[in-house]
Amino acid sequence: MFEEKEIANQYVPLSFKDNIGLYIKREDQLHEEISGNKFRKLKYNFLRARAYGCKTILTFGGAFSNHIAATAAAGKAYGFKTIGIIRGEELADKYLENPTLRKAAANGMSFEFISREAYRLKATPLFIEDLQREFGAFYLIPEGGTNSLAVKGCEEILKAADQEFDYICSAVGTGGTLAGLINTAGQGQRVLGFPALKGDFLTAEVRKFARGDQWELIGDYHFGGYAKTTPVLLDFLSDFYARTGILLDPVYTGKMVFGIVDLIDKGCFPQGAKILAIHTGGLQGWNSKFDSELVKI
């Protein structure tokens, strides 16, 4: 279960100042549907669920969630029933119009649509007890998939060959992927996180699981907040794909790579630095909220 494909770091064939080299770790190629950091985050949670004898996985997410899509695909692949508690009760009668939810449903996931007010209570014991009464026994995975087992999976992203890089970069959603990278980064490597959300709360979230202090969050490239974009970002993604053949998503990896390139242009990296950016997947997002922009790519 969750057999890992061998993937290569892809050199970005662009000319950067100061002889700086940028490489992309193609975690998006791990699995067709359970790609990138979702493959990593779900791996040990699904193994734990199987060890416990659980037959049902329950989790949370929004209408365009990579985590929801990946959990449904993993459930189908490995024989688990999956339940998604989805933010937004207005979606109950029209979820098949949403490509992410339609695909998750095709992969066997059943949904419970709840109000945004109720969704804010999702982690409380009383809310979980209500879900257990409604659905029976299940294995719970939190929104975004981040817990200690998810971090354990993300600690497997970096390999021995990755020690040659000076900087390891990742987009940040809930902080689990970045924590895994921090825990396995080599001595002298600096880990940079590029949040896709506004706000300062992520530092505390990363510190829940991270060991060491060789990291920082770069909060200047969220483009207005989660799932927000601008014409500048979308033009960058189109140009980057045309010049490199690497497709980035507009929610996470696109903002990260935009930030890396901008920091290189500003002279923020030393001469000859080697940078490894983690492609955490999320490309299904192009087929949902941003499908109208895909024609540019």
Image (cartoon, grey):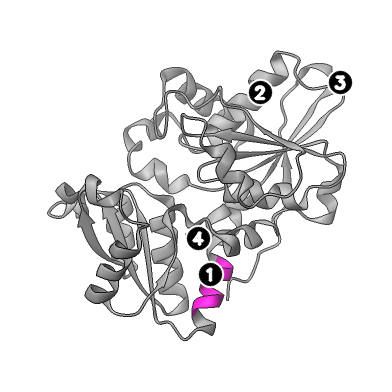
Judging by the rendered image, the residue that carries numbered circle 3 is 271
Judging by the rendered image, the residue that carries numbered circle 2 is 261
Kindly tell me whether residue 247 is visible in this rendering. Answer: no
Give the Cα distance between marks 3 and 2. 14 Å
Magenta residue check for 144: no
Please provide the residue range marked out in magenta. 43-49
- Above or below, 123 against 75 in this view is above
First of labels 3, 4 by sequence position: 4
In the picture provided, is 20 more to the left or to the right than 221?
right
Judging by the rendered image, the residue that carries numbered circle 4 is 34
- Above or below, 161 against 127 in this view is above
In the picture provided, is 10 more to the left or to the right than 20?
left
Give the Cα distance between marks 1 and 4. 14 Å
The reply to whether callout 3 and callout 1 are in contact (CB within 8 Å) is: no
The reply to whether callout 1 and callout 4 are in contact (CB within 8 Å) is: no
The reply to whether callout 4 and callout 2 are in contact (CB within 8 Å) is: no
Tag 4: Cα neighbours inside 10 Å, few (<14), some, or many (≥20)?
A: many
Q: Residue at x 40, y 41 (%)?
A: 286
Magenta residue check for 45: yes
In the rendering, which numbered label is found on residue 8? none
> For numbered disc 3, what is the local secondary structure?
loop
Judging by the rendered image, the residue that carries numbered circle 1 is 45
Q: Residue at x 59, y 61 (%)?
A: 148
Give the mark toward the camera: 1 or 4.
1
Give the Cα distance between marks 3 and 1. 41 Å
- Above or below, 130 against 192 in this view is below
